[in-house]
Image (cartoon, rainbow, N blue to C red):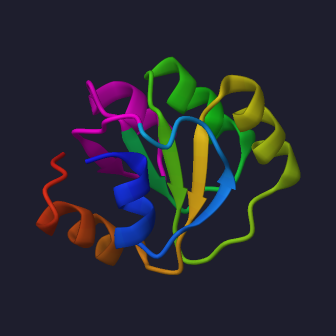
Amino acid sequence: MNVRDIISILEAEVISEGDLDIEVKTACGSDMMSDVLAFVKDQSVLLTGLMNPQVVRTAEMMDMHCIIFVRGKEVDPMVIQLAKQKEITILQTHYRMFTACGLLYVNGLRG
């Protein structure tokens, strides 16, 4: 699966565009960045409802390629600017985290 597939599956809007053709094999969903840092290994995609620059910094530290903000939340301009600097794709979907994770899972993306 690549980021373009995720955009289609989640009916997502591209907020900040990195490499949309990059292959992603795994994902995680969390609003606690400390859990992401402590327990997540080799994840390509982060789904979250947390809306601050720390999300981008966490994704960068974990070599994640894409952040998906759930529940249709408006993305803070500072978050967008930082993601562009780090070349991390930001997507926004209207789905809740549980549904978004489930849709990705049934379409082949694992945790």
Name the residue at 30% across, 33% down: 43
Picture quarter containing residue 108? bottom left
**98 on left or right of 77:** left
Q: Tell me: residue 90, above or below residue 75.
A: above
Picture quarter containing residue 14? bottom right
Identify which residue, 3 or 103, lies in the foreground: 3
Task: Give how far across and how far down residue 41 sits, in percent.
Answer: 26, 25
* Count of residue discs: 0
Name the residue at 39% across, 36% down: 36
Task: Give how far across and how far down residue 4 sits, in percent.
Answer: 42, 54
Q: Quadrant of the C terminus?
A: top left
Picture quarter containing residue 71? bottom right
Task: Give how far across and how far down residue 5 sits, in percent.
Answer: 35, 58
Was residue 31 drawn as part of the magenta stretch in this picture?
Answer: yes
Q: Extreme front residue here?
A: 21
**107 on left or right of 62:** left
Name the residue at 63% across, 35% down: 56
**99 on left or right of 89:** left
Task: Give how far across and how far down residue 79 sits, in percent.
Answer: 76, 44
Q: Tell me: residue 3, above or below residue 69.
A: above
Q: Which residues are magenta?
A: 22-44
Was residue 87 drawn as part of the magenta stretch in this picture?
Answer: no
Identify which residue, 35 or 24, lies in the foreground: 24
Name the residue at 53% across, 72% down: 93
